[in-house]
Image (cartoon, rainbow, N blue to C red):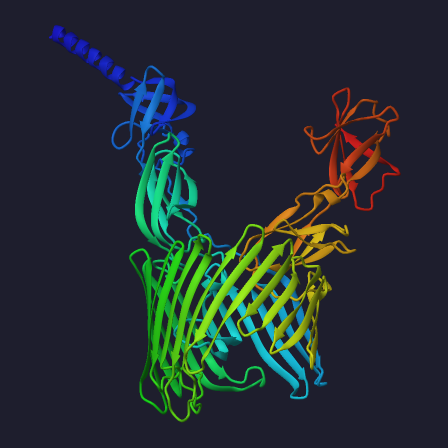
Amino acid sequence: MRTNTKVLLLINFFISLNVTAVEIKSEERIANLWINGLDHAIDVDLIQKDDQYYIDCNILKERNIDVIGFVKLTNKDNYCLVSGGEVNSVFDEASQSIKIDIPTKYFAQNAGGINNSLTPEKASFGGFINYDFLYTTNSDHDDGFNSLVDLGVFKDYWILKNSLIHRNSSEEDGVVRLSSSLDIDFPEKMTRLTLGDTTTASNPLINSLRFAGLSWGTNYTERPDFIYWNLPVLQGSARIPSTVDLYINGTKIYSERVSPGDYALQTGAQIQQAGNAQIVVEDVLGNRSVQNFPIMVTNRLLRSGLSEYNVALGKLRYNYSTDSGDYRDFFANTYYRRGLSNSTTLGTNLSYSQDIQNVGFTWTQGVSNYLVLDSVILASHDATHDMNYSYGLSASKDFGRVSLGLSTKYNDQDFIFLGDELESTFTYPKFENLAYVGISNLPYIGNFNINYAEQRHYKNTQNNSADQKLITVGFNRSFRNGFTFGLSYFNNFGDNKDSGGILSLSYNFDDKSVYFSASADKSANLQFVKNDSSQVGVDYNFGADYRDSETVLNANATVKTNIGDLNLYHIQGEHSSDSQVNYKGAMVFLDGKFSLTKRVDNAFALVKVGDYKDIDVLRSLTYANKTNSKGYAFVHEIIPYVKYDISFDVDQLPIEDKIPYSSKQIATLNQRGYTIDFPIYHAKQVTIRPLVGQSNQAFLAGSELYINNEEGELYPVGSDGTITLYGLVPKTYTLQIKTADSKTCNAELVVTEAQTSEDVRTIIFECQ
């Protein structure tokens, strides 16, 4: 029995030794890292256990790999298993490398900026008054004075506007309020709310209506930063870093570098064309793959899943420019359009008033890779007539250098839109037809086009509109030296017969141009034009017209200043003359400052450059203005939802000044003001005499003074016990002196704008 016990104990001992050996079996080494056939040129800590390999999870994370699904090492949960299952690895003894094969799904997706729309900055509190004064006179002594005034008050994302017009002439005299409204933008939702006077959203299913009330909806078309149409999305996967190129009709349109993983890249707003497309993917090892597919990109098709809409209700307005308060019928209008796919967009519009109701449907369809079909069905009902209809169909094709289109529209005789006068004798044309062909970059010819337009009307005693049938043919060619040649011919063979041709020539050099045209009716025109994009300067044109056996001279000059633009215009004929004087400008309030400026038509910025005058301020690297005597300048014509770089010329400042930054990117809303402050610190020179606290003893020459910390600038104490500190900007500094006996002494130095370098300041240091 004792012998058996000993045997059992011995067996258990050997079993335990074996188990222990299995559990501790592991090996750690340094290995070169390869992923998906690409050498990452980095050594990693590799752990081998049970013929499986583990590496540091952070190494994978740094390479854009999602490690959540990876198995972790039991006693080191920061190490990820890279062998077995979908992730495989092989250790190469010859090169001492771990070569890992990782499926693309484990890489973070390359989101190539789908809808990278800008969020504009909130406007500063401010306001403006635009004014436009016009004085006219002629040889008949018919003088007149008109003035237009726009008032705007804004902050953040809202703006309150009001506009008035005053007329003083032989025909009318008085003041008319044109509009009053409050606009509130919601940039992140891409919508706008308008309260007050406004117009219905533009769409093919309704005529634009002026009204007072409420308007709420999307504003995609006003935003150049937002891609709302059916841009192609380049999709695929890359095992290693690669370059993705898009070609359309053999021309390279887009290029993007991608990291390993699945990618879905938006190509950007520059594509508006159709044809044969190729996606070429080339990785860093030189491997290439090519995918061919048809493509059609047009802003008439909404992107798949995107909706645009507008809801408007209020009272219709009539006689807009002559009556301040001609508000009549209550109405409501709803517009909705949605991209069902990248090739199909449907829309509808419903309009209601007590007298007139409209409903309409639109269907935009991309066919194959070239053709776009637009169909419209409209119905109207009014107090006098039952249902009447309007039908429209258009087809267009654009493939590279050739574009063509065809459209037709039919209206019932009694078809009417909301906003039309019921008592009016006006009727819409019975048929409207249009056809066009355009070819660009033809050899020797350049650009060629031919157009046909037709209108046919209902004939009755109340409507005597003439039928129109007009064909035009023309071409123009531009040469490298700035010369352009054009020739066109038209023939109206409708009720009003007419035909003729026009020859046009132009030559551009620098900011000047010469234009000449002559037509078959023995009329001619010659103009010399000087025009540039600067905010300040003089633009002008002068020339002569010959028509109806009479020579008419004309001259026009615009004097552009920082406080507005003055335009002078004169026409002198053999028997008559006309003259105009027009002044446009504004008064703005922003950041507590009033100033006379240019007219506020887009956004503007108040740019401060310290207190320096005559400093060039740049808008996207183009000269815009100079700072005034108070150190600021206004920059105008900042287009909304476009990123601008506002900067100044740092070379015009003293070299000793310190500048934290000299440029700022800004995206704006329309007719808002923004303050951009570039702080300029005038560097000071300060001489101090450091003394030890209580004893007022001077520090030994050669003692070391530090500013802010030991890693800061070092200044030695001079033989006279003083230290001169250079390049200081106005703020509070921490000074530290280390003595020979290892004491640390501290004090504070306050530098102000008024600081001078003439006096020696005594500073007491407390030592420890």
Q: Quadrant of residue 524?
A: bottom right
Which residue: 54% across, 85% down? 319
The image shows residue 661 at horizontal and vertical percentages of 66, 44
Q: For the N terminus, give its image quadrant.
A: top left
The image shows residue 213 at horizontal and vertical percentages of 49, 78
- The answer to whether residue 692 shows anywhere in this view is no
The vertical placement of 750 against 613, above or below, is above
- With 273 as the anchor, is 663 left or right in this view? right
- With 494 as the anchor, is 698 left or right in this view? right
The vertical placement of 512 against 52, above or below, is below
- With 405 as the anchor, is 696 left or right in this view? right
Q: Quadrant of residue 418?
A: bottom left
The vertical placement of 326 against 543, above or below, is below
The image shows residue 375 at horizontal and vertical percentages of 32, 70
558 or 132: nearer the eye? 558
- The answer to whether residue 467 shows anywhere in this view is yes
The image shows residue 620 at horizontal and vertical percentages of 61, 51
Q: Quadrant of residue 525?
A: bottom right
Q: So how many labels did they put on this image?
A: 0
